[in-house]
Protein backbone atom coordinates (compact mmCIF):
# COMPACT_ATOMS: atom_id res chain seq x y z
CA UNK A 1 0.00 0.00 0.00
CA UNK A 2 1.21 3.42 -0.82
CA UNK A 3 1.72 6.39 1.46
CA UNK A 4 -1.10 8.78 2.24
CA UNK A 5 -0.98 12.50 1.59
CA UNK A 6 -2.80 15.23 3.51
CA UNK A 7 -6.20 16.16 2.16
CA UNK A 8 -8.63 19.01 2.70
CA UNK A 9 -12.23 18.66 3.76
CA UNK A 10 -15.05 19.23 1.31
CA UNK A 11 -12.93 18.31 -1.71
CA UNK A 12 -14.25 16.28 -4.58
CA UNK A 13 -13.19 12.71 -5.18
CA UNK A 14 -9.49 12.15 -4.42
CA UNK A 15 -7.46 9.58 -6.39
CA UNK A 16 -4.08 8.01 -5.65
CA UNK A 17 -2.94 6.04 -8.67
CA UNK A 18 -1.20 2.69 -8.25
CA UNK A 19 -1.78 2.81 -4.49
CA UNK A 20 -1.88 -1.01 -4.28
CA UNK A 21 0.90 -2.60 -6.33
CA UNK A 22 2.47 -6.00 -6.96
CA UNK A 23 -0.88 -7.79 -7.20
CA UNK A 24 -1.92 -10.72 -9.33
CA UNK A 25 -5.29 -12.40 -9.63
CA UNK A 26 -3.57 -15.69 -10.43
CA UNK A 27 -1.52 -17.47 -13.08
CA UNK A 28 -1.78 -16.55 -16.76
CA UNK A 29 -4.35 -19.31 -17.30
CA UNK A 30 -6.68 -17.39 -14.97
CA UNK A 31 -6.09 -13.98 -16.54
CA UNK A 32 -9.83 -13.32 -16.74
CA UNK A 33 -10.13 -13.09 -12.97
CA UNK A 34 -10.13 -9.74 -11.22
CA UNK A 35 -9.17 -8.69 -7.74
CA UNK A 36 -12.04 -7.46 -5.61
CA UNK A 37 -11.17 -5.20 -2.68
CA UNK A 38 -13.45 -4.53 0.27
CA UNK A 39 -13.17 -1.57 2.64
CA UNK A 40 -14.37 -0.52 6.06
CA UNK A 41 -14.39 3.06 7.39
CA UNK A 42 -14.22 4.03 11.06
CA UNK A 43 -14.70 7.77 11.58
CA UNK A 44 -16.75 10.46 9.88
CA UNK A 45 -14.26 12.63 7.98
CA UNK A 46 -14.19 10.20 5.02
CA UNK A 47 -17.54 9.17 3.54
CA UNK A 48 -16.48 6.67 0.88
CA UNK A 49 -13.38 4.66 -0.07
CA UNK A 50 -12.80 2.40 -3.07
CA UNK A 51 -9.75 0.41 -4.17
CA UNK A 52 -10.01 -0.46 -7.85
CA UNK A 53 -8.91 -3.87 -9.12
CA UNK A 54 -5.92 -2.20 -10.86
CA UNK A 55 -4.73 -0.60 -7.60
CA UNK A 56 -6.01 2.99 -7.59
CA UNK A 57 -7.40 4.26 -4.28
CA UNK A 58 -10.23 6.80 -4.37
CA UNK A 59 -12.03 8.49 -1.52
CA UNK A 60 -14.41 11.34 -0.79
CA UNK A 61 -14.19 13.49 2.31
CA UNK A 62 -17.08 14.91 4.28
CA UNK A 63 -18.04 18.44 3.26
CA UNK A 64 -18.28 19.52 6.91
CA UNK A 65 -16.23 17.18 9.15
CA UNK A 66 -12.48 17.23 9.83
CA UNK A 67 -10.38 14.69 11.70
CA UNK A 68 -9.21 11.14 11.23
CA UNK A 69 -10.89 8.18 9.60
CA UNK A 70 -9.33 4.74 9.86
CA UNK A 71 -9.66 2.57 6.76
CA UNK A 72 -9.27 -1.21 6.45
CA UNK A 73 -8.74 -2.91 3.09
CA UNK A 74 -8.98 -6.61 2.32
CA UNK A 75 -9.31 -8.74 -0.82
CA UNK A 76 -11.64 -11.50 -1.97
CA UNK A 77 -10.35 -14.80 -0.49
CA UNK A 78 -11.23 -16.88 -3.56
CA UNK A 79 -9.29 -14.75 -6.00
CA UNK A 80 -6.18 -13.62 -4.18
CA UNK A 81 -4.11 -15.72 -1.82
CA UNK A 82 -1.28 -13.41 -0.75
CA UNK A 83 -3.25 -10.41 0.58
CA UNK A 84 -5.37 -10.24 3.74
CA UNK A 85 -8.80 -11.71 3.11
CA UNK A 86 -10.68 -10.88 6.31
CA UNK A 87 -11.16 -7.75 8.36
CA UNK A 88 -9.22 -9.29 11.26
CA UNK A 89 -6.01 -9.47 9.21
CA UNK A 90 -6.62 -6.42 7.03
CA UNK A 91 -4.10 -3.58 7.06
CA UNK A 92 -5.34 -0.26 8.32
CA UNK A 93 -4.34 3.29 7.52
CA UNK A 94 -5.58 6.72 8.54
CA UNK A 95 -6.76 9.56 6.35
CA UNK A 96 -6.40 12.90 8.15
CA UNK A 97 -8.80 15.55 6.89
CA UNK A 98 -8.04 19.19 7.69
CA UNK A 99 -10.05 22.38 7.23
Image (cartoon, helix red, strand yellow):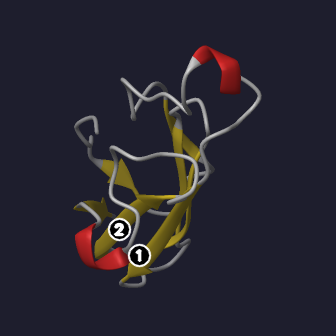
Residue 88 position in % (x across, y down): 27, 79
Picture residue at 24% right of the left edge, 69% below the top: 89
What secondary structure is marked by label 1? loop
Task: Work out whether residue 71 or residue 74 is closer to the camera in this orientation and state it.
Answer: 74
* Residue wearing tag 1: 45
Residue 14 position in % (x across, y down): 53, 44
Task: Work out whether residue 12 or residue 50 is closer to the camera in this orientation and state it.
Answer: 50
Residue 64 position in % (x across, y down): 50, 78
Distance between mark 2 and mark 1 Cα atoms:
11 Å
Task: Work out whether residue 92 or residue 12 is closer to the camera in this orientation and state it.
Answer: 92
- The answer to whether residue 4 is above or below residue 49 is above
Picture residue at 40% right of the left edge, 61% below the top: 73
Apparent side of residue 5 relative to residue 46 in the rendered image (left or right): left
Apparent side of residue 27 relative to residue 72 in the rendered image (left or right): right
Residue 79 position in % (x across, y down): 57, 48
Picture residue at 40% right of the left edge, 63% below the top: 85
Q: Residues within 10 Å of mark 2 (few under 14, many from 20)?
A: some
Q: Residues within 10 Å of mark 1 (few under 14, many from 20)?
A: many
* Residue wearing tag 2: 71
Amino acid sequence: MGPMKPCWWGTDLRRFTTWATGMSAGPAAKSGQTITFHTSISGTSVVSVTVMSYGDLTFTTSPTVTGDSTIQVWADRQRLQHLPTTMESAPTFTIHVVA
